[in-house]
Structure formats: structure tokens, C-alpha cells
Image (cartoon, grey):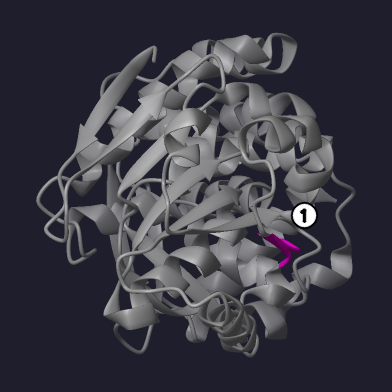
Amino acid sequence: MLNKISIHSNIHNYQAEFYDDFSFFESIKQIKNKAIIADANIIRLYSDLINKYLPGESIYSFEAIEENKTINKACEIYEWIISANAKKNMTLVSLGGGITQDVTGFVASTLYRGINWIFIPTTLLAQTDSCIGSKTSINFKSYKNLIGTFYPPGKLFINTSFINTLTERDFYSGLGEVIKFQLMKGGDKNIDDIFALIESCKKDKSYLQKVVHEDMIIKLSYMEGDEFDAGRRNLLNYGHCFGHALESSSSYYIPHGIAVNIGIIFANIISVKRNLLNSELSERLTHIVNKPNIYIKLRESDFEEGKLLAALKNDKKRIGNALTVVIPENNNFELIKADDVTEAEFKITLNELKNILF
């Protein structure tokens, strides 16, 4: 083990352990009463590893797509676990990215009113962001993450070498969250330094071990004293308010982290127009860091005003009649939750965003 981070939770404390090898599978192998659920891609890409450490184990192959973040899929997994004569003292072992985590964590939190589970995040997005924080979620109809629980794993095993087998699309999705955390850490912001860090991540993926560890510490600083998202933790939704709407509007063609990256541009435009964020700083960030890391070819049809507005109105973070967006309140990117964004302000911001992107 390289190092570890201890995480406090009102539900139960847990640890994130960092490795540069796969020796942690030995401890999983020793668990007698377990159910293993893995992203189908992990089963395919790491079959030798699985056969070495988990020979003969029955593994549920999970297709990690947004369409499977449903109560129906959770029920299918319940049936699979129960059919194996599982008991409340079992451990659910989950390997995969954020979607796999959301569904398996939800299953673990609700089956027998809560069973132990271990998560091995295999994507940059899951390692740098979603693996800590206790949240589990499933989608309901077209509404993202509308149903969920707070239920952290008993332990996290992190090895950033999994990132080497990600598709470019998934890698850049993870970079969206890396960009967010680099803006959210304290102190003065140097856009050139953020650009250099992102380029280092792209050129040498071994550099990501340091970045994932740092981003986890940044996230924990926002969660401290607010595990259940009632105050300061809300600020972690920087880029997510518009980002979640964009995911829904695009029928998940735009992956989460890339949608967050675009959502950061959207939030910054609002901040500039409210005379909170310097326009030159925002433009430099957009054109040096955000826009070059969108990666996928965007479709104008996904930015249709009516669909996006409807999704924002149904966002779970909204508490009043106006729209909710987390925005920077100054040039150090200290954040505030703006619960007073009007439809007129949304439309003006969306038009400016489209001019930037297209």
C-alpha cells in the first residue's frame, strides 16, 4: 500500500487505500461470504487479473450505461444476490466506474437495510470524485440521480493504472472533474498552472496518482461537517447544475465529466454577467482549459432551450421558483449557491455558451 486517507462518516468511517499493484485482491479473496459485481468492460479487459485472484467466483457482469441506473436493474441485482442464498453478513464487492458505484451502492444500502460493500473505482471520474462522499443514486425516468441514499463503502481500493485502459471519451470525462477540483482548491488561481497540470495528466498517466489523492483531499474539505449535503458540500455542484441538465438533454451522449466541464463555462458566464468574476480570467479559462478538453463533437440539438430549462427545473438542488446554479463569487473561484437565476438570465447565458461552443 502506498498511502491511505481516513474518511469520517456519520454512518461508518472508512478508508481509501492507494496501491501501485493489485495485492489488495488478496484481502478480497479471503472474504468468505461475498457477491462480486463488475463492469462488463473490466471483466473483459482484466480477465487474467480476475482469474488470478478470484478463480471460480461467480461475478455479475454489469453494463455500465446510464440506462441501467434504474430501480429495475437494482431489483435484478437483488434477485441475483438472493438466489445465491446470501445473508446480511455478506460483503458486496464492486468494480467499475461511477455508474457501477451508484447502482451497487444503492443495492448495498437497501438490501437487508444495509450490507457491507467494498468499492474498487476503475475510472478517473470515480477515483477523483464519486468514490468518496457516501452518495448512491439511480435515475427516474429522464431525471438524473433523483432517487438515492447516503451509504459509504466499508473500504476503497484505488489503483490508478486502471485508467490506462479507459477510452479517450471516459478519460476526458474524468478530466472534467479534475478541472473542477483544481478551481475549487484554496488560494490564487493561475490558469497556466491548471493547464500544465491537465497536460501532465494527458502525457503521463502515472502523474494521476498524485492528482487523484489531491482532489480527494479537496473534496473532503468541502464535505467536512456537511456529509448530507445541507450546506457547504452543495458547492461541489459547481458545473453540475447545468451539466446534469445537459446529460439528460443529450440522452447521455455527453458523458458526466464533459457535461460538468461545459457546466463550468455556463456558471462562469453567469458570474461574469453579475460582475463577480473577471471576464478576461473567465475567457482565458474557457479557451485554455475548458474548451480544449471537451473532446467529443458537440451537437447543437442537445442545447435546445426548452429541454435544458425543463431539466433544470426538475433538478434536485433547486429549492425555490428560480433556477439554482453554483457560481464563482470572485476571481479566486470561491463559490456560492445562486438560487435566484431567472429564466431570462438562463436564456442569455445559454446563447452566449452556444456562441462559445459552436
User: Magenta segment, which residues?
Assistant: 59-65
Q: Which residue is mark 1?
A: 40
Q: Is residue 152 left or right of residue 176?
A: left
Q: Is residue 266 visible?
A: yes
Q: Is residue 335 left or right of residue 158?
A: left
The 10 Å Cα crowd at callout 1, few under 14, some 14 to 19, many 20 or more, is: some
The image quarter in which residue 249 lies: bottom right
Disc tally is 1
Residue at image coords 56%, 23%: 22
Residue at image coords 59%, 77%: 77
Query: Percent x, y for residue 198?
Result: 61, 19
The image quarter in which residue 135 lies: bottom left
Residue at image coords 84%, 44%: 44
Query: Percent x, y for residue 86?
Result: 45, 73
- Whether 60 is among the magenta residues is yes
Residue at image coords 51%, 65%: 104
- Of 157 and 236, the residue lying toward us: 157
Q: Is residue 318 visible?
A: no
Looking at the rendered image, the quarter that the N terminus falls into is top left
- Of 293 and 333, the residue lying toward us: 293
196 relative to 156, above or below: above
Query: Percent x, y for residue 149?
Result: 34, 74
- Whether 70 is among the magenta residues is no
Q: Is residue 343 left or right of residue 33?
A: right
38 relative to 294, above or below: below
Amino acid under disc 1: Ala
- Of 331 and 175, the residue lying toward us: 175
146 relative to 247, above or below: below
- Of 344 and 123, the residue lying toward us: 123
Query: Percent x, y for residue 126?
Result: 53, 44
Secondary structure under the numbered disc 1 in the rendered image: helix
